[in-house]
Each structure stands twice: as C-alpha cells, then as structure tokens.
C-alpha cells in the first residue's frame, strides 16, 4: 500500500504537524516486566499553527489506546484509527469539539499501554543480562519507532521538550534522555523516577532504560551507567577521552554543549547499534568495552550528535545524511585534533571511503538506497539503513571543503550553520541555500567555484560521485597496512612476526584485515592458520578485530571458525556485525546460518531480527 502523509508533510508520519504542532510531552508510565509492556498516559500540549484546525492526527503503532481526554475541560474526546500501514502503524485521529484558530492551545491526555509488539522496546530476561538476577529493558526509537512507545507526532521536523515519570519494580533503576528531577522515592515495592528534557527534541530521541544499573563518574560533566559487573571496565574505557571529546566539539562548532550533563549507559550486547545519541544519555553497546580504549571513537561520534542531529536535525528521513554525514565529518576532525595529526583524520576518512565503496557494491540491487536523498515513500527508513548517509555524506562535506579553500573556511561556515539552525530541523535544500549564501556573501568565494559544485550528482544520483579522496588524503598510515598485507597475499606471510603490529593503532589493525578481506583471491586455509598463529586476532577483546578476522575466514570457506562465529553471533547483536556475518555464513552454509539464527532469534532487537529473517529467507 503506497502511503502519503495527510498534507504531504512527511511520508513516514500520519501527523498533521503543519496544522497543529506539539509543544510539550509528559509521560506517566509504569514498567511491567511480567507482561513486557509500559502502561500509563501521555499528556500532549499542542498549538494550532494554522487557522480552522478541526482534528489532531498522531502516529501510533502496536499501542492499545484506552481513552483520550481534553485536559482543559476534563471531558473525553471521540477518536478513531482510520488508516493502517504495515510499517508506519495506525493513525490516531482526534476530532476537536469545534475548529480552532491559529495560536490556540490544545491539551490532551491519552491513556494507553504498549504491547508485546511494540518494536521500540527491547526486553531481557535476567539470564540475558550481565548480573543474571534482574530483568532489563530499554527503548530504541530511531527512526520511526517512537510511535511504538507513545502516541505522538513521530516526525523529525517536530521538536518539543518532554518530561517523564516512570514507576518500576524495586530495586531497579530508571535513566532517561533528560536530567533527573528530585530524588527517586519508593512506595509499595516500587520506585518512581522523574526526568525532564528542557531542550526541544524530536520524538525519536525520547529514551528510557530500566535495569539493575549503577553509576560511575568519568568526567566533570559525564558519568557512565551500567550493571555493576561492567562498571569498572566502563569507567576505565571512557574516563580518559569523554571530556576532551566534548571540549573539542565545542571548539569546532563554536557553541557550548547545551545539554548540561553528558551521561552514557552500557546496554546489553543485543543493542543493535554501536551507539545512539539520546541527549543526556548516550546508549552504547557493551561490545565497545575493548579494555584498551581503542573503540572510544564511537563516543566521539555520539557526542558530535549533540550538535549535528540533536541540536540541528534532519527535517525528514530522506535527509538523514544531514544528521550522520555531518557527524562523521566533524567526528574525524575531532579525532585528528585529539591525535594532533591531520594524517590520522585522513586515515579515518580513507577507511570510511573504502567502506563506502563496499556499501555501494553491496547495494547494487538497490541503487536508490545509494543516493544521499533516496526516495523512501512506502519504505521504512530502517530498510534503507546503511553506511551511505554516513560515508557518502561526510565525503560530500570533504568535497565541499576542497571547493571553498580548506578546513578553516569550512569550520567558519559550520559555526554559522549550527548557530542559525540551533534547535531547528531543516532540509537538504535549506542547508544548500545556507552554504551558498555564506560563501557568496560572507567569504566572497568566486562564483565560478560555487557554480562548479556538483550538488545534483552527490545528492540525487546513485552510486559514487566523481570525487576520489585518495587524491587529497594523506595515505601514510594506510600505506603501512597495505605493505604488511602484501607480505601475506604476495609472499605467503614470509618473514612476518607478532612485532609487525607493534606500532599499529587498533584502527590500523582493522584496516590491515579489511585489506586482506578485499583482496580478490581469498587466503588459503593454511595461510589463515598461520595468520592466526602469528597475530592471535580471534582472541583479542576488540570486537572490531575479531569480527574482521571471522569475515576473512568465511571469505575463504574456512569452516573451522564456525564455532567462533556461532559464539560471536550469540554474544553481539549489533547490526554492523550481525548482518554481514549472517550473509557470509549463508554463502558458506545456509542451513548452519539458519540454525545459528534460530538459536539466537530472541536475543536480537526486532530491527535486526527482521533483517536477518529476510536475508536467510525465513518466513
């Protein structure tokens, strides 16, 4: 069924936000681990932004709506659910007692509960947690799953503050994407927690986590939450760089960190992403606890979202690259400054470019998804999720940097961009106009240069643009990796020793393995064994390195790693690892891949579960 928004506002939302917009949300919820639901109410404050508004239309999916009340009159309101869509859910239509004029305030209370099918909530039994004693749950609402947590205008163009009061069983702890209000209080074996988010945010950034959490300080304005079994490792991992990342982000954007505290929470390994930038409470995968601080670049990425994404947001999901492309671009500037090395920035960027090449090849049957502005009508944004908005988006910004005269000039524009669009949502077209206006009127850039920018090819065309970053990047760090890889692919590993990697950073080890994976001739089984004996890749704690070694082995049909692959897929649920591993495993042994998935199906987040089911052709 093709779907169009009611007024064309957003093809992924029923909400009529060009007529009436949310100005505040308050949630009063209780967590029921037995039924695996949240239940309670959502108080929505809205304002008519057009005249003659007669109805409020909201997004819901897998919610049980009980009652809608006008909070001003305390009278129940008639409501219907006239439209349904498999991915987008169910429209909640609330006719008003009489049409209202622009500026009119509307106050609704919607009593409801989530259901077991609310895909934005993940539940874990005690045995699935680190402590093995208490259950655990968390929400993951990006891209269009906020509607499975609450009835709302689930469109990134709509931003509003929110507050929440959550009741949970003692002795569990609740943390949310806001700052705490008062002191938690206990009654009748339950504890009530309150949080508020004073800055306007899109609904997908509303986040709740509930479990046996403890907290450790990692910086002057940062703490990490985790189960107690993981706290020492988490504090060690993130105490060195977090504050430096924030300060460097402030320096680059020219804007202070507007969110007060920057806290993180370590989620169970089934969390489908490396991180999620929920304001005040970044969600992080337990897979990042490498023990050597080698994967903290994910924190640099999520902190950057404090400006790019949370502060200045894509207007719709077709413009997702405005969130992720800008974030990756700035993240790499931060990492370059942290390493005091432009070569390191270019090293990270080159790795990203090679990831882009691979992603474009992997998506050759879906060329629409390789555009920076794909057509997502009737498509769940999660179906189009890939590295394209991240890597092609950041590549586009690097291309623009070369056009306007270098990084310093680009940073001048970024400071102006974030200032002008603070706490707003925007489209790619608005970003383009802002860029051209700035470099025309403030930087006085030559018109011929600006006219030569290939906006259309980057934004609208599938595949790779006509810009090879290898022509402008410092390749010194990658060349060391390539030289070592040639010793294995061309000389059979002759003369290699464990000391080969002594001065390699973790990212260089990853790139070395990526180079072997990309080689047109798979390594022989004997050479794989020698590689493992020399470098012990499969036994390191860095999940990125282990993942790459397993992918390398599967590329050679090396079935001896099947037990390690099965253990990995039972331990980590991050989509970045899970989808490629199942794809590789399917090619080697489809039935074994299905067995591993069957054994772990309940462990994965619904987004990952559905993707792998489709991949393995399980109906």
Image (cartoon, helix red, strand yellow):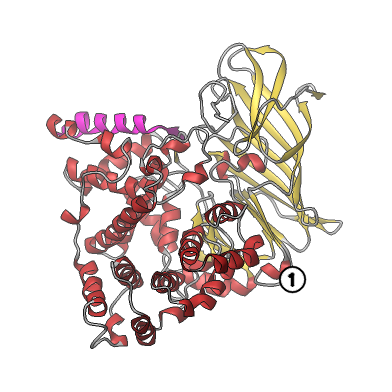
Q: Within the magenta stretch, is there residue 14?
A: no
Q: Is residue 83 above or below residue 165?
A: above
Left or right of 169? Residue 438 is left
Residue occupied by mark 1: 133
**Residue depicted at x 68% and y 46%:** 118
| Quarter of the image where one finds residue 369 | top left
Does residue 310 appear to the left or right of 350 in the view shown? right
The magenta stretch is: 424-445
Residue sitting nearer the eye, 332 or 583: 583
Question: In the picture shown, does residue 159 fall above or below 72?
Answer: below
Query: Which residue is depicted at the point 34% across and 79% down?
Result: 524
Along the line of sight, the residue nearer the viewer: 253 or 60 = 60
Local crowd size for mark 1, using a 10 Å CA cut-off: few (<14), some (14–19), many (≥20): few
Residue lying furthest right: 188
Describe the element under mark 1 as helix, strand or loop.
loop
User: In the picture provided, is 315 more to the left or to the right than 98?
Assistant: left
Q: Is residue 195 among the parts visible in the rendering? A: yes
Name which residue lies at 76% across and 26% down. 71
445 relative position to 148: left or right? left
Is residue 281 in view from this perspective? no
């Amino acid at each position: 069924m093709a779907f169009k928004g009611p007024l064309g506002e957003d093809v992924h939302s029923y909400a009529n936000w060009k007529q009436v917009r949310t100005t505040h949300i308050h949630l009063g919820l209780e967590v029921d681990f037995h039924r695996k639901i949240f239940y309670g109410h959502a108080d929505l404050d809205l304002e008519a932004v057009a005249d003659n508004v007669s109805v409020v239309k909201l997004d819901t999916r897998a919610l049980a709506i009980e009652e809608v009340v006008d909070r001003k009159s305390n009278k129940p309101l008639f409501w219907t659910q006239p439209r349904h869509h498999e991915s987008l859910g169910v429209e909640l239509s609330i006719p008003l007692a009489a049409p209202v004029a622009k500026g009119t305030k509307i106050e609704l209370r919607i009593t409801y509960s989530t259901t077991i099918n609310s895909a934005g909530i993940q539940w874990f039994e005690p045995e699935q947690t680190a402590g093995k004693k208490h259950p655990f749950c968390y929400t993951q609402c990006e891209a269009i799953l906020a509607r499975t947590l609450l009835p709302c205008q689930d469109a990134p163009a709509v931003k509003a503050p929110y507050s929440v009061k959550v009741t949970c069983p003692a002795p569990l702890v609740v943390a949310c994407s806001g700052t705490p209000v008062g002191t938690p209080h206990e009654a009748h074996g339950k504890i009530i927690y309150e949080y508020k988010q004073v800055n306007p945010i899109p609904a997908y950034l509303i986040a709740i986590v509930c479990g046996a959490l403890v907290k450790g300080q990692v910086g002057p304005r940062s703490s990490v939450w985790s189960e107690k079994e993981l706290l020492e490792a988490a504090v060690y991992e993130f105490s060195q760089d977090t504050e430096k990342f924030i300060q460097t982000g402030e320096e680059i954007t020219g804007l202070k960190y507007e969110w007060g505290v920057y806290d993180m929470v370590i989620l169970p390994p089934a969390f489908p992403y490396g991180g999620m930038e929920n304001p005040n409470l970044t969600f992080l995968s337990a897979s990042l606890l490498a023990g050597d601080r080698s994967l903290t670049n994910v924190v640099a990425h999520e902190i950057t979202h404090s400006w790019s994404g949370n502060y200045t947001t894509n207007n719709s999901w077709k413009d997702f690259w405005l969130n992720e492309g800008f974030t990756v671009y700035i993240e790499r500037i931060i990492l370059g400054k942290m390493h005091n090395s432009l070569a390191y920035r270019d090293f990270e960027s080159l790795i990203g470019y090679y990831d882009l090449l691979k992603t474009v090849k992997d998506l050759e049957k879906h060329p629409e998804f390789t555009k920076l502005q794909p057509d997502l009508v009737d498509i769940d944004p999660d179906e189009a999720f890939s590295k394209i908005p991240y890597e092609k988006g950041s590549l586009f910004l690097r291309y623009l940097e070369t056009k306007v005269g270098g990084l310093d000039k680009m940073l001048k524009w970024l400071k102006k961009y974030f200032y002008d669009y603070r706490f707003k949502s925007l489209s790619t077209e608005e970003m383009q106009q802002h860029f051209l206006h700035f470099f025309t009127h403030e930087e006085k850039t030559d018109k011929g240069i600006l006219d030569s920018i290939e906006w259309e090819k980057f934004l609208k065309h599938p595949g790779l643009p006509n810009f090879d970053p290898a022509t402008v990047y410092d390749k010194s760090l990658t060349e060391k990796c390539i030289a070592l890889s040639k010793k294995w692919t061309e000389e059979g590993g002759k003369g290699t020793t464990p000391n080969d990697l002594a001065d390699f950073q973790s990212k260089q080890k990853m790139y070395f393995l990526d180079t072997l994976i990309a080689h047109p001739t798979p390594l022989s089984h004997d050479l794989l064994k020698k590689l493992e004996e020399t470098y012990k890749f499969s036994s390191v704690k860095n999940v990125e390195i282990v993942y790459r070694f397993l992918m390398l082995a599967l590329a050679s049909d090396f079935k001896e790693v099947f037990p390690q692959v099965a253990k990995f897929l039972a331990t980590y649920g991050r989509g970045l690892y899970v989808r490629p591993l199942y794809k590789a495993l399917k090619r080697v042994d489809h039935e074994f891949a299905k067995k591993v998935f069957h054994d772990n199906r309940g462990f994965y987040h619904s987004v990952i579960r559905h993707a792998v089911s489709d991949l393995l052709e399980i109906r």
